[in-house]
Image: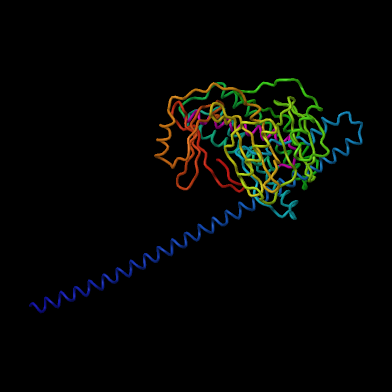
Amino acid sequence: MSENKKRGDDARKVQEEVYAAREEQRAAERVAAAQRKEAEKQAKIAAQEEKARLKAEREAESRERARLKAEQREEERRRKAERRCSQSSGKNYGGWLAAVVSLSVAVLALGAIVTVGYFDLKDTKASLINGMHESVYELSEQVETLGTDLAKIRVSQGNYKSQKLLADMLVRCRLAERAVENFPVDGIGTQRLTAFFNEAGDCAQKMLLKLASGEQLSEEDMRSLEGYYCDMQTVREAMPALLKSAEMDKNLLGEGDFENRFEDLTARLRTQEQPSSHKSETKGKDIGEDGALKCAKNFFSDYKADEMRVTGRTEGENPAYTVEFKDGAGVAYSAQITLQGELKMLQSYKSCESENFDVRQCKQIASRFLEKTGYAGLCPVWASSSGSECTVTFVGEQQGVLVYPERILVKVCSERGIVTGMDANLYLKNRGEREIGEGKISMERIEQAAAQRMRVHGVRRAIIPVDGREVLTYEVRGTYGGRMYFAYIDANTGNTAEIRVVTRTDRGWSLL
């Protein structure tokens, strides 16, 4: 019996070992299969990421080609205008030429997105024209949907439905803005239409936040939406003719029917002036063209300027004289000098191609330029470099508090170590003394709370615009999960007012 039992136990052990070996083999096979599947998944993800990267590079190349071609076209128009004006009596020289060469406010984009890289321009024309046609159709699609959204919002009942429609309106306004940037027209028309979509998008964002916080839309909000609805109908009704002219004008680069229809459309649009609590007052007498020329010679004395002249005057909230010149290397520049002798805008017509100056040096170059042009005491808060150009953001500072509404953007050519672009519109609009309180919440408390969520690199007080008003906040700079964050915490409530993430885009590093 014992022998039989022993043999039975041995047989069971053998069976168990065989079963265990079989299970172990099956487990190994499952692991191997899972590993193969994971490897295939990772390879697929890598392939998709590579495809997305290549697509982004192609899109960036197309946009850069369009930008360079537009600059070349603008320069050629300027030269033609000069030749025409030199043959005329000169009576309307300044105002007419100013309309031809007026600057676009999109030269230095908000958020300091910087152009990256150098691209071969041999096939520029074909790519440019294709991109322009796509932009016209893209605008038409967004306008059609925006008109429908606004029509629904006018009669919408219920918080959820209104939020959904406003969110869609915000996204489509931003897409429409992007489409207009590639239009083959002068800066005045694109500026007006871009401003319209920008204001409509800001309006949608403000109301969306209002509804999200539990509030209701006011009568004033509804009047604003009604105004945007009427203007969107104006754009919508003009789009069929604009599309037809785009189809007829296969070139799109000349002054044909497309440009005439676009100019007619933008001339009919209104822009709603956004309120500003600290709008600067225009003080002093008009310095005149001679005074503007004198200021420009002083501002750009290091440029070895040649052929400097006043070519006209721009109107608007901050009227300015347009001054054009060439530096010692023959590079063309256009600047705007306000009636009080302040530099409002600078633009160059030549791109940079290499890096001879790093970000630290570019900051110093930008700071010296602002001091020379009368903007001393501003604080550099952000710099973004593409390798060939560096854009530095400066803001005002009062009682140790950063004042973001007072912002100036300065673009430095990393190849030549010289300022080639500058935009002081927001600074001139919003500068002024402010009554700054201490806030109800201490900086130590904010820093301790932030340290629980991220690695904090610094905290400082800052005034930022939120929903059309200025809010005192604590700017918290920190990292979490390999990403850099700028969080703005309301100094009186402790609520998060704004969060920005440092993000790599196809045109440089940006705060989004």
Front position in the image: 183 or 412: 412
* Percent x, y of residue 213: 46, 29
* Percent x, y of residue 207: 53, 29
Q: Is residue 414 above or below residue 42?
A: above
Front position in the image: 76 or 474: 474
In the picture, which quadrant includes the C terminus? top right
Instruction: Identify the residue at the far left of this view.
Output: 1
Q: Where is residue 480, by image quadrant? A: top left
Q: Who's the residue at 75% across and 47% down the image? A: 69
Q: Where is residue 181, by image quadrant? A: top right
Colour scheme of the rendered structure:
rainbow
* Percent x, y of residue 348: 74, 41
The magenta segment is 183-212
Instruction: Identify the residue at the far bottom of this view.
Output: 3
* Percent x, y of residue 160: 47, 32
Residue 498 visible: yes
